[in-house]
Amino acid sequence: MKYKHLFGPVPSRRLGISLGVDLVPHKVCSLNCVYCEVGKTTNLTINREEYVPLQDILNELKHYLDQNPELDYITFSGAGEPLLHNGIGQVITFIKSNYPKYKLAILTNSTLLYDQNVRKEILGIDLLLPSLDAVSKKVFKKLNRPNPKLENDKIIDGLIKFSKDFSGTIWLEVFIVPGLNDTIEELELLKNAIIKIAPDQVQLNTLDRPGTESWIEPVSKNRMEEIAAFFKPLPVEIIAKFQSRNKVRSYQKNVEQQIIETIKRLPCTDIDLSEMLGIHINEINKYLSELLHEGTITSHQQERGTFFRAK
């Protein structure tokens, strides 16, 4: 079977061998974050729908999981916001009922957790990886560029309520963008909100590879360490890519080589590579980040997006 909605397993530093489940088309999202590595949001929405056929997802999962693969997690992620799919609860129930040995994780921007129904639907997972980048309305709008109907205080309240009801683990990610959410005022607001949310871990991240907007810069390792110290005594760690990903068990050198050989012949965007190689864009981006980190490839911003070239 050729999978349309499953991808990987991807080489994830946080999740090990992680099978991705993509529930929405490319860039259907409730935010249009300036740093997003998979490009600008093309459908900025908070409407929950069956964006891809539920039965197709279940069929692919059955075919894949019946083979008893070695996985650390099955992760709802992709190139959009997974909670926008109105059948995510049914997918969770299907996996937990038929393949209970597998752990489930959700990567989410947190924006739909204000909805009590959404919170109930996902209580059966093992790990939630939500994000919260800003508390003030001004920074939230400039950094995350939300659907106009979203209110950040309601999003934070949803995170707090979910945390109280959830028996699993929460790793809360904060993506630091210089000049936006790294000011003392915004960091204080974030810290106070995170104390109320009470996640099991706070994970600080910064730019890994070119984002949606070319003016976004990464934060230095020293500054990230200062911010981590500021968040103490909260349990905090830095997950920004100051270490290699290629030691992860699911890192495939043949995929890396396919990418290098392709961009040796012709500079490509991540979308180009995804289409040409038949590999999900999230997986492509994991390898591009590693190759940029190693200095094997370079990136150049052009009108159609970020192009990657082999050195």
Image (cartoon, rainbow, N blue to C red):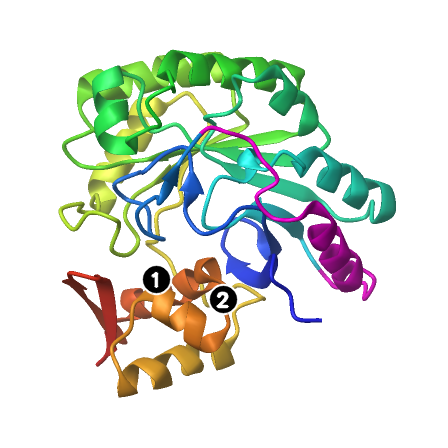
Between discs 2 and 1, the one toward the N terminus: 2
Q: Residue at x 55, y 27 (%)?
A: 200
User: In the current view of this chain or complex, which residue is farthest to the right?
Assistant: 98
Q: Residues within 10 Å of mark 2 (few under 14, many from 20)?
A: few
Look at mark 1 in the image and give the residue it sits on.
289
Q: Residue at x 71, y 54 (%)?
A: 56
Say the numbered circle drawn on residue 247: 2
Above or below for 112 versus 175? above
Q: Residues within 10 Å of mark 1 (few under 14, many from 20)?
A: many
Q: Mark 2 or mark 1, which is nearer to you?
A: 1
User: Could you tell me if residue 125 is visible in this image?
Assistant: no
> Of the residues shown, which amino acid type is indicated by label 2?
Lys
Quarter of the image that includes the N terminus? bottom right
Which secondary structure, mark 2? loop
Above or below for 133 versus 249? above
Above or below for 230 versus 75? above
> Of the residues shown, which amino acid type is indicated by label 1?
Ser
Which secondary structure, mark 1? helix
> Foreground: 267 or 195?
267
Residue 146 position by quadrant:
top left
